Image (cartoon, grey):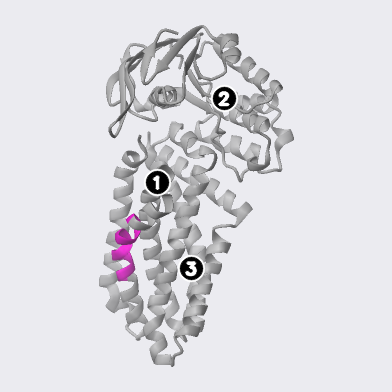
Amino acid sequence: MSFSAATRSALLIAKKDLAIEAKTKDITVATSYFAGLVTVISALSFYMDTSSAAKIAPGVLWVATAFSGLMTVTRSWAREREMNAMRALLMAPISRASIFFGKSLSSIVFLLIIECVLVPLVGLFFHVDISVLPAVAVFVLLGVVGFAFAGTLFGTLSVRSSARDLTLSVVIFPLITPALLGGVAACRELFHGAPLADLQGWGQILLAYDLMMAIAGWLLFDLLVSE
Amino acid sequence: MSLNKVEGRQLVKRFGRTRALAGVNVELRAGEVTIIEGTNGSGKSTLLSLLSLIAKPSSGHLRFDNRKVRASDRSRISVLSHEPMLYADLDASQNIDFFAKLVAAKKERRDSLYERFRIQELDGRPVRSLSRGQKQRVALSRALLSMPALLLLDEPSTGLDEASVELLRDVILEEKERGAVVAVVTHSDSFASEIADQRVRLHRGKRVEA
């Protein structure tokens, strides 16, 4: 299959996921609500001054991102599992890699919508200097892309395994550790006033992680979905 | 993209220590309907998974027109099962349009299936809310989009009313007339006897006399 045909199939699959979400809104609305709740409860629990707020904010942001990401990929694969639509997808004359990249792309879009709610909320409740939010968005974007690739790749296990959510949680959290650590550390430095130029190392780690997960998905997805 | 013969030789499929198929030989021919029957757990659905190229045999080989199967052969196969294999939240047209683009079906083909299975009258509601017979109409349209050379049906009549079973039987016979290789897994002896050209009976993963 040619690259352009594979790209077309991937975009078609992502578009289908977005069309389902436009109808149901059950990923973006429910998960944004959850992420917002984590932020508000954390802000109320950790009664804090401006200085301690900056120390807690990165943890809250990335804990909410990690659990929101897990909810997103779990729900996205549940749609493929329901009525066994996944089988029709696997039977289609398209490359398995295009299924992986299509599902990843839609998960990235869902997670970015959720982050559009989460990042300003964290900024508001944890007294974050508004000028650092664009830089935070860069690291969130890098983290979300890696999470979406890893979640989509190992989310296939949730389609085939009877202990779906447990399997996914057990597998995915150790795998996304590099992305989470990079994201937390970079945001910690940003909230303490470090310039973006000083954080290139963390950016490179996140970028390398994204690339590694994309290649892993491209190579391993077929193996994971084959019986 | 026609297919004259599908041949499975000494097909074995293991899941861990369980042997679901234990050396099954089958030959399916174009323009014939082959019924695959047997009790629960006899290996019928596993055999269908191998024929659909979704699963790979642990040993033995599968040949299409006397050559080894390739991944690209997936474009010649379609599966219809008791599960509709559709997106529950999309409506009938959205499902068909999506799969039509995925298999690069011609517009004329899509339109004729819309008409044949009266898809338009099912629109506006998610597939989840349709009756079993209505879901099967949408699933039939999906399965036939690519004009498959090999059509595999896994207990397609389960839970259908009489009119839907009749429609299903007509479709199977039309596909047979068109020259497709058709294999049907079913528990219904009456349904099988109406359409069968050949019967393959499985028992505990082995082929036995039908």
Looking at the rendering, which quadrant does residue A6 occupy? Answer: top left
Magenta stretch containing residue A181, yes or no? yes
Instruction: From the top left corner, tell me how far across and down residue A95 is, in percent.
Output: 39, 36
Image point (44%, 86%), residue name: A46
SS at badge 3: helix
Nearer the observer: mark 1 or 2; the answer is 2
Nearer the observer: mark 1 or 3; the answer is 1
Nearer the observer: mark 2 or 3; the answer is 2
- Compute the Cα span from label 1 to label 2: 26 Å
Q: Chain of mark 1?
A: A
Residue count near mark 3 (Cα–Cα under 10 Å), binned few <14, some 14–19, many ≥20: many
Looking at the rendering, which quadrant does residue B167 occupy? Answer: top right
SS at badge 2: loop
Q: Amino acid at mark 3?
A: Glu
Q: Earlier in the sequence, mark 1 or mark 3?
A: 3
Q: Is residue A63 left or right of residue B18?
A: right
Residue B156 numbered mark, or none: 2
- Note whether B196 is above or below A156 in the view shown: above
Quadrant of image for the N terminus of chain A: top left
Are the residues flagged by discs 1 and 2 in contact, CB closer than 8 Å? no
- Name the residue nearer the viewer: A128 or A134: A128
Residue A156 numbered mark, or none: 1
Q: Amino acid at mark 1?
A: Thr
Q: Is residue A156 left or right of residue B67?
A: right
Image point (37%, 39%), residue name: A225
- Please check whether the numbered discs 2 and 3 fall on a single chain: no
Tell me, yes or no, if residue A206 can be seen here. yes
Quadrant of image for the C terminus of chain A: top left
